[in-house]
């Protein structure tokens, strides 16, 4: 059952990228803030419906604020980093953010480790480097460095805060915690959209609402399963496995569905990613 949920997380994570790509094509690659506001609102509704009943406990409010702040920071800073710096380097740095929940599990939760786990993590990081790194012109400025570091921290802390909340409440308040967090994210994204892309809001909603609904459901399901599985599997194993599995699925989507040409370095990255999966399961 654990590996079935893990597979669903990997597949649904991989499906989010094509949905976003279709949305960008439909709307002309308009504001990420509008898309973020819509998708987080739908994900919030997903948790509100799936949780059945809402039991508010002020004790989890701090975790909701933490997750919302991390999610919003990751989204906004990633968009701004892409606007002022290298696409390839930004994607590379953010992809390494999986190390935050992984190291949290190893250092703070004292989860059991083995030489195979460390080999799996090392080969996974090499795989991510080979897949994302490209020789690309783009000035590395202090502004870009600050933004990409914040995106890195925000992206990694999302999963870490989820893990912390579930440990603190013994697996309870999944839906309630996420409803409050996603409501904060949706409101934050809407404010940014009003500030920067007010004229595009109506058009993006009209042209891309169904992609936002699909993404929100996928994202909500992923977050729910991550919290459920987080109580059954160590963070130091789960998050690297999700990342490694995503490498394989995204490769096949890119090559055979979107017909993208992949370089020899990216092909090598795929093979190294497969090796990392083998190490994680030894």
Image (spheres, grey):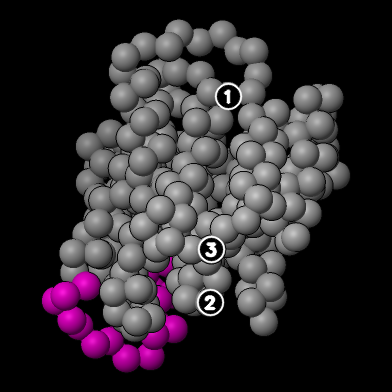
Cα distance in 3D space between marks 1 and 2: 35 Å
Q: Is residue 122 left or right of residue 168?
A: right
Residue placed under numbered mark 1 in the picture? 88
Examine the image and state in which quarter residue 128 appears.
top right
| Rendered-image quadrant of the N terminus | bottom right
Q: Residues within 10 Å of mark 1 (few under 14, many from 20)?
A: some
At a point 40% along the width and 63% down the height, the residue shown is 109
Q: Is residue 223 above or below residue 31?
A: below
Stretch in magenta:
38-60
Q: Is residue 39 magenta?
A: yes
Q: Which mark is residue 255?
A: none
Q: Residue at x 38, y 81 (%)?
A: 171
Badge 2 marks a residue whose secondary structure is loop
Residue carrying label 3: 112
Q: Nearer the viewer, mark 3 or mark 2?
A: 3
- The answer, for residue 59, to whether it is visible in the render is yes
Q: How busy is the neighbourhood of tag 3: few (under 14 within 10 Å), some, or many (20 plus)?
A: few
Q: Disc 3, disc 2: CB below 8 Å?
A: no
């Amino acid at each position: 059952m654990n590996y079935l949920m893990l597979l669903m997380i990997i597949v649904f994570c991989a499906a989010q990228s094509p949905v976003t790509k279709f949305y960008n094509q439909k709307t002309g690659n308009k504001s990420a803030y509008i898309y973020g506001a819509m998708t987080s609102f739908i994900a919030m509704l997903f948790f509100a419906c799936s949780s059945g009943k809402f039991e508010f406990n002020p004790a989890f409010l701090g975790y909701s604020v933490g997750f919302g702040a991390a999610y919003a920071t990751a989204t906004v800073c990633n968009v701004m980093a892409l606007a002022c710096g290298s696409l390839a380097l930004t994607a590379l740095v953010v992809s390494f953010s999986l190390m935050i929940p992984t190291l949290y599990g190893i250092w703070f939760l004292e989860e059991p480790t083995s030489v195979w786990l460390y080999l799996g993590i090392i080969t996974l990081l090499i795989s991510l480097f080979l897949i994302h790194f490209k020789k690309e012109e783009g000035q590395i400025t202090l502004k870009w460095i600050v933004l990409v570091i914040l995106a890195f921290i925000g992206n990694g802390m999302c999963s870490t805060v989820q893990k912390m909340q579930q440990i603190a409440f013994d697996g309870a308040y999944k839906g309630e915690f996420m409803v409050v967090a996603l409501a904060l994210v949706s409101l934050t994204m809407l404010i940014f959209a009003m500030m920067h892309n007010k004229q595009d809001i109506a058009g993006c909603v009209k042209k891309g609402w169904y992609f936002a609904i699909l993404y929100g459901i996928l994202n909500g399901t992923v977050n729910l399963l991550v919290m459920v599985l987080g109580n059954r599997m160590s963070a130091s194993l789960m998050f690297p496995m999700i990342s490694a599995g995503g490498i394989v699925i995204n490769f096949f989507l890119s090559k055979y569905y979107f017909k993208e040409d992949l370089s020899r370095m990216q092909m090598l990255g795929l093979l190294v990613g497969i090796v990392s999966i083998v190490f994680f399961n030894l």
